[in-house]
Image (tube, rainbow, N blue to C red):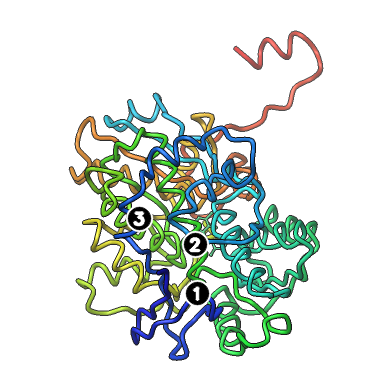
Amino acid sequence: MLKLICNSCQKEFALAENRVVCDCGGLLDLVQPLEELKKLDLKKTFDARLGSRTLLDGSGVWRFRELLFPAQKIISKWEGNTRLYFSEKISQEIGAEIFFKHEGENPSGSFKDRGMTAAITAGASAGCRNFVCASTGNTSASLASYCADAGLNGIVIIPEGKIAFGKLSQALAFGAKVLQIKGNFDAAMQLVNELSRKFDPENPSESVYILNSVNPFRVEGQKTIVLEILQQLNWEAPDWIVLPAGNLGNTSAFGKAITEAFALGLIAKKPRIAVVQAAGANPFFKYFQSGWTKFEPVADPETIATAIKIGNPQSYLRAKRAIESTDGVVLEASENEILDAKATIDAAGIGCEPASACSLAGIRQLVKSGEIKKGQKVVGVLTGHLLKDPDTTIDYHLGKLANVEITKANRPIAIDATVDAFLSAIR
Ligand code: F0G
């Protein structure tokens, strides 16, 4: 039987109790019935659904539903099914086989849609109508889109002036109620945590249901990023999976997916995970460096990668477990490393938003330190689309970013509308 367990006080809840967090404030984990699941031929089932024209089998999340949870009626936008690019150019630079899983190809342009379809399905099935999140931008865009589609009330709390324009424009356009607060993401998250304590499972339609990754169903949906990578690699695990880290929901989901896939025999070895924070927003990196002895939030996080400008990540205990269970590592990347990696991914014709480029920044560090060996297979996860934050890209190429090294600027050239001017410009 599926159940939820508090990772702080170990209290158990049945799924039907409609819980998002525990009474003690601890986060809940959904425990999969692995012994029952072992009896199924999951690889065959998942592979048979590829290319299906029905939503339930065709969604890149619900295709893996045996490893999620049962749902009467799914709220889905065919999310997932994102490309796994092999980059010849970057592989040559690195000396390893480098793939990029482009989660920016989801319906709202980020990986959040995978967690959103799962959590909003769970909330709506429980009778909830009002959905809220704190966000650095992508979660709000995703929530707004799913709520609009399903006719539900979407409310997003964002730090004023601190989210990329592409994301703000999505939340507004999709018609969510956009509440801007004066503080940063951590302050918005604190407000949402207070709201979550007021959630009344007995009266869901009048309550506000939380769609941040503290919600265990978000984690279940995001596990499918890993499951889809494994399926695309024909169930042969890569050596490494590298991803950016902010609030640490995705890190938690990756650890859970790898642990379950290995326990179920879907893969013969566990990929190691490396998660990468921005150096100005690095509490989890410092926690790892301390040998897991001291977790301290960063009071005033700062980075150009606004998606991961987070000082007090909520899922740090779940994420610690993910790192430990995959022999993983935690890294930090400087602003220069992030921007150079982004310019490299962009110039390879793939493109991503700044936070996503932490993946390549981390891969480069692991190659330098010798942890990634020649010829190994590495998947970098690109969490958001290039067009989420066009301002940063343009400012980079126009040389308008202060205090960063710009090595790959591609400046536009103003010319007269004549053939001579054209020829001299392309010479
Ligand atoms: N990459 C992007 C593009 C993100 O938007 C986020 C998180 C992350 C990486 C980090 O993932 O939080 O699970 O560790 N964005 C959240 C938001 C916080 O509100 O959109 P994480």
Q: CA distance from mark 3 to mark 1?
A: 18 Å
Residue found at x 24% / y 61% = 325
* Residue 69 marker: 2
User: At which x and y percent is residue 370?
Assistant: 18, 43
Circle 1 SS class? helix
Give me the C-alpha separation between circle 2 and circle 3.
12 Å
Mark 1, residue position: 15
Give me the disc on residue 37. 3
- Label 2–label 3 contact, CB within 8 A: no
Give the class, few, some or many, for how many residues have Cα within 10 Å of label 1's Cα (few <14, many ≥20). Answer: some
Of callouts 3 and 1, the N-terminal one: 1
Q: Are marks 2 and 1 in contact (CB under 8 Å)?
A: yes
Relative to 347, say whether 252 is above or below. below
Amino acid at dot 1: Leu
Along the polypeptide, which appears first: circle 2 or circle 1? 1
What is the distance, in whole Å, between disc 2 and disc 1 at their CAs? 9 Å
